[in-house]
Image: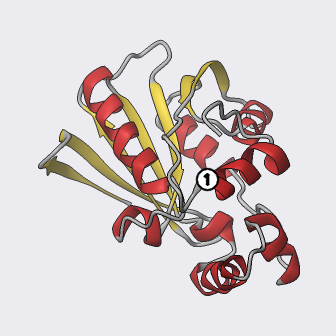
């Protein structure tokens, strides 16, 4: 839908591309570094997290993962797809309701279930479609989440390598990260 240069203070210059999905009418953002490995570029699929990405919440590792991804992509070349999937695609209001239940000692999975919501509603088909539109079908994926890998492969993207994106836990997100590891199968070594 739109494309422009985006100079950043910390990460350098990116191409900023905006896509609009025919499936759900959501707007997706792509940041692509000038230097891109044409054979199997470094790619990060990052779901929007207002609390972590913008307000730097310590409850999750999202903001730190975004920062680390952009640094790696700026240095090595690659693409970040910023997906409009707040709170594992349950939306901001439900995410904050889930936070409230987590304050009462539920974990993130239990909170979503108690609200009658899916544990993780994200669908990476739109990311696969964007990659194909950009003529990228073979990637190195920055992720700890095996579900991203499975969905991309099922949608015709070859994941030649997964690169862990683990952030050191803090006292606020340690249980959240343990839940991701134990109940959601994320590959995490530090928890």
Q: How far across and down, in percent of the image, does residue 166 sit?
A: 53, 36
Q: To which quarter of the image does residue 60 belong?
A: bottom right
On screen, 83 above or below 90? above
Q: Position of residue 67 (x, y in %)?
A: 34, 46
Q: Nearer the viewer, residue 86 or 136?
A: 86
Furthest residue in direction front, as rendered:
171
Tell me the quadrant of the picture where the C terminus can be found.
Answer: top right
Residue appearing at x 40%, y 62% in the figure: 53
Q: Position of residue 157 (x, y in %)?
A: 67, 29
Q: Is residue 67 above or below residue 59?
A: above
Locate the N terminus by quadrant. Answer: bottom left
Residue, far top: 39
Label 1 crowd (10 A; few <14 / some 14-19 / many >=20)? some
The x, y position of residue 139, in whole percent, is 55, 23
- Identify which residue is drawn at 44% across, 71% down: 50
- How many numbered marks are there? 1
Q: Is residue 160 visible?
A: yes
Q: Is residue 180 left or right of residue 95?
A: right
Q: Disc 1 marks which residue?
A: 174
**For the point 45% across and 22% down, which residue is it?**
41
Q: Is residue 147 left or right of residue 3?
A: right
Left or right: where does residue 158 sit relative to residue 147? left
Question: Quarter of the image holding residue 107?
Answer: bottom right
On the picture, is 126 further left or further right than 65? right
Instruction: Report whether residue 23 is seen.
Output: no
Image: 96 above or below 127: below
């Amino acid at each position: 839908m739109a494309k422009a240069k985006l100079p950043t203070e910390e990460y350098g210059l990116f191409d900023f591309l905006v896509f609009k999905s025919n499936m759900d009418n959501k707007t997706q953002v792509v940041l692509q570094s000038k230097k891109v490995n044409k054979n199997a570029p470094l790619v990060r699929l990052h779901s929007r997290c207002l609390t972590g990405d913008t307000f730097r919440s310590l409850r999750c590792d999202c903001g730190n993962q975004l920062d680390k991804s952009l640094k790696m992509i700026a240095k090595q070349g690659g693409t970040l797809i910023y997906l409009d999937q707040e709170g594992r695609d349950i939306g901001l209001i439900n995410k904050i309701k889930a936070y409230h239940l987590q304050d009462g000692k539920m974990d993130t999975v239990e909170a979503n279930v108690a609200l009658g919501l899916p544990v993780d509603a994200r669908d990476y088909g739109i990311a696969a479609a964007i990659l194909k539109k950009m003529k990228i079908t073979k990637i190195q994926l920055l992720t700890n989440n095996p579900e991203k890998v499975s969905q991309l492969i099922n949608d015709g993207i070859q994941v030649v390598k997964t690169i862990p994106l683990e952030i050191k836990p803090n006292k606020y997100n340690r249980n959240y990260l343990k839940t991701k590891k134990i109940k959601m199968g994320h590959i995490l070594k530090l928890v």
